Amino acid sequence: MIFIRKLHKWLTLLIGAQLIVWLVTGTIISLIDQTEVSGDKTRQSLSNQKSADPLRVFFPSHQLSIGPELIHSIALTKILQRPVYRIEQSGETTLFDATTGNELRIDKRLAEAIARNSYRGDGEIANSELIALGSDEVRDFAGPIWRVNIDDDLATRVYVSPRDGQVLAHRNSRWKVVDFLLMLHFMDYAREDSFNNWQIIIVGFGTLWIAISGVLLVLFSFGRSDFLWLPGFRSGGTKVSSKVGSENNEEQSYDLDSTLSYYSSLSQHGVKLSSNCDGSGSCGLCKVQYASDPPADTAVDREWINAPDLADGFRLGCQHKPCSNDVIVIPDMAFQQSLQSAAVVSSQWLTPLLKEICIRTDTPIQFRPGDHLEFQIPSFNVDIDQLGIPSECVNVWRELELSERLVHTVTDTVARTYSIAVAPNGEASSDLRFTVRFAPPPDGLDVQPGIGSSYMCSLQAGDQVMFRGPGGDFLLHDSDREKILIGGGAGMAPLKSMAVHLLSNLQWEGKLRFWYGARNQQEILYRDSFDKLAAEHQNFEWQVALSDAHDDKSWTGKRGFIHESIFDNLLKHHESLGNCEFYVCGPPMMLAATREMLSKLGVAESLIRFDDFGN
Amino acid sequence: MKAIRLSRKVHKWFALVLGIQLFLWALSGFYMVVVNIDIIHGDMLVQNMDRNVGSYSQVGIPLEQVADQYPDSSNITLTAVVERPAYLIDGPTTRLLDANTGALMSPISKDIAAQIATYHYAGDGVVSRIQLLETDPPTELQSTALPLWRVDFDDVWNSSFYINPNTGQFTTRRHSLWRVFDFLWMLHVMDYDTRDDINNNILRIFSVFGTLFGLSGVWLLFYSFNRRRKVGTAK
């Protein structure tokens, strides 16, 4: 699709000007009355020009002085009232007066009379001239030509052949305009009266591809959502009955729209599966579990759900439509109708683009390490200058070339999930932290910065936020296996919660490693607290690899991408890989690379848990 | 940022409504420019198109005798039908006369029509069907008066030659590429009836909205290539 859009866009950039020329000239030509253009409106039809007198001949035809050239035809005809012989030979036509036998020349008087006879408008002959070089208004006739001008509104001119007195054409000012438009329409700049020239063939070929790609784009860029304004369309789908429940909500029958996905059809009933991508299949959050007979998994399912879970009937809610008698289990959180509220206690930039937000919930909540909250994103309109960006980071922001304000207007309920970056504290806690990386538009793409991160980064102490949750499936196994946490960027949050929980809350004694990837020293989150944890706990290993710090002489640690670093320095030589479990969280590229690396190592999928960056 | 969304939406909905016609314009236009018009006209299918009446002094009956015989004629032309001189007489009725014997040739028979067609035919097929069309002209003869002999050849072009029975003249020819051209032309000018009215209202409406659509594309194109405007965060 991206290729088709690119093709469409670039071809149009290349030849779009001609497309507009075609459309504009075509439109004007169709709007101008053709009978005016052709002159037919004021042209006498041939049958009305004929005189009723019989063809009377006084001069014998065999005495005509006919040249030796090949004869195509000899005709006895009339010019105006006068009988004439017309002899067509290769290359020329000769007229003889049939009364006298003299060669007949089409002189000015005769040419004007012929023109007058061919014209039936309300104008009169103004003047006439013999154009020696021919006229560019009658391009297929070479040589001298009579032009008889008539003083009507359209400045009609009648062209008469001096060779045989034939009326060659009626032209007028309308014709002139259309002739010019046709030249542009046919790209016939050389005036060959042809639309088979090479330039139009090339542009026409390009246009064909614009048209083909355009048709494909139309086919793909319309969805159901485009037609919801049609009466009856909103509720129009066929209903099927599915049973839906969760751990703490008993199964209940829902009449769901079978033309929509589970994600969309459940949402019509107020049951909201989490999603950061509004059901487009790019966040992997809206997992549902089929109790039996799950549908065939899609490529998107396989991207976000590992094989053992797929076998257990897990699928993405945005990828499958309800079928009768489905029984599915969804997360508790989806049933949460009421929102909870919290106050922002503080917010500060930890790196140029990453902000830590601390909130205090109105009522304490119970959560597990790795859990997330789902924040409601309200309308906002914030000046970038009000984000509290430290002066040393302003340059980084300037390079993003953003608009001056971050703006979002709520049209539909939008929510985004963020992992809790602190460990649970006893039974329930109310002080929570989140690490949110501001998401600028990808390079070259003309879209807004992420609305979730824009909103979160705009929060300041005292602001009120609304949320649902906690929830999530990025959880620690209850096992004695060695735990290896691999994180990148803001993917720190759930891993921090896990590490601190294991070490400080549980006093866990198994081996725990946390390998963290950042671009440079500035971007190592919570460096001091992890250094301290590592010093206090013999069983905890804390490693950082920097991917973008070639010039940084002060860094003595590891360099390179985190998945390469941990492979080279740890996993390649690890003696009991089968007894390790992995927890991976980071930006999409890092996540994909790490999962591929682990898969190549042969680590069982059931021992790898992962969470997308920012969830 | 609002405008780009709107431009995309406008362009997309225009395309949904006008898309098929725009595609047909591109497709029919491409066919018309890429297949040379001489091929469409069937120039490769014909020969002997230069008539030759030979020497006038050897023609049995002179022009003025024909004029005397048919005093109501408006136009008498000595021409050649398959290399034989013949008089073509225009008047209240159109006639064809053998110029050597004075015998009336028109209306010409099926066999003569086939002879004339074959004489002018330059392809490698043979005559497969001959029929006289008197009423209900086929679509490919919209602007031509009947009656006409239709002589079909069994070549790859599906050529049909049309001979006028009253004049013996080779009136016109049609073949597959011509027929495709004519059909695409109909789609191009949206005159599904006579195929020659380029002032019809359907075409006018579609071309006006097509132009607006094109302009919405330019508008969108502007956004698609225009990078975000640089606005500093520090004043």
Image: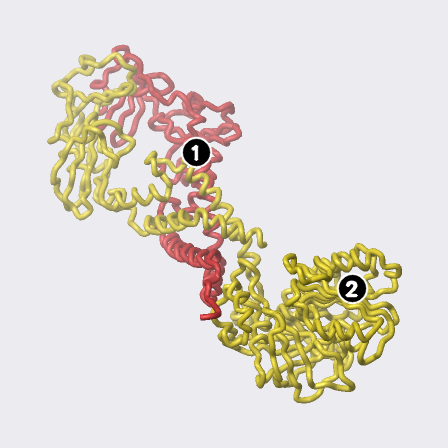
In terms of depth relative to the viewer, which is nearer, A17 or A476? A476
Q: Which chain: red?
A: B
Task: Report crowding for label 1: few under 14, some 14 to 19, many 20 or more residues within 10 A (C-alpha).
Answer: some
Q: Residue at x 79, y 78 (%)?
A: A501
Q: Residue at x 53, y 53 (%)?
A: A215
Q: Give the chain of mark 1.
A: B
Residue A225, image x and y in percent?
Answer: 56, 67
Q: Judging from the image, what secondary structure is the residue with disc 2 in?
A: helix
Q: Closer to the camera: disc 1 or disc 2?
A: 2
Residue A111, image x and y in percent?
Answer: 15, 31
**Left or right side of B119 for A254:** right
In terms of depth relative to the viewer, which is nearer, A13 or B8? A13
Find disc 2 in the rendering and name its residue: A310
Q: Which chain: yellow?
A: A
Question: Taking the image as drawn, is residue A293 in sight?
Answer: no
In terms of depth relative to the viewer, which is nearer, A255 or A84? A255
Tell me: residue A274, above or below residue B87.
below
Tell me: residue A549, above or below residue A275.
above
Residue B228, image x and y in percent?
Answer: 48, 62
Residue B150, image x and y in percent?
Answer: 44, 31
**Labels 1 and 2 touching (C-beta < 8 A):** no
Image quadrant of residue A42? top left
Amino acid carrying label 1: it is Asn
Tell me: residue B94, above or below residue A548.
above
**Left or right side of A512 for A374:** left
Q: Give the chain of mark 2.
A: A
Amino acid carrying label 2: it is Leu
Residue B36: numbered disc: 1
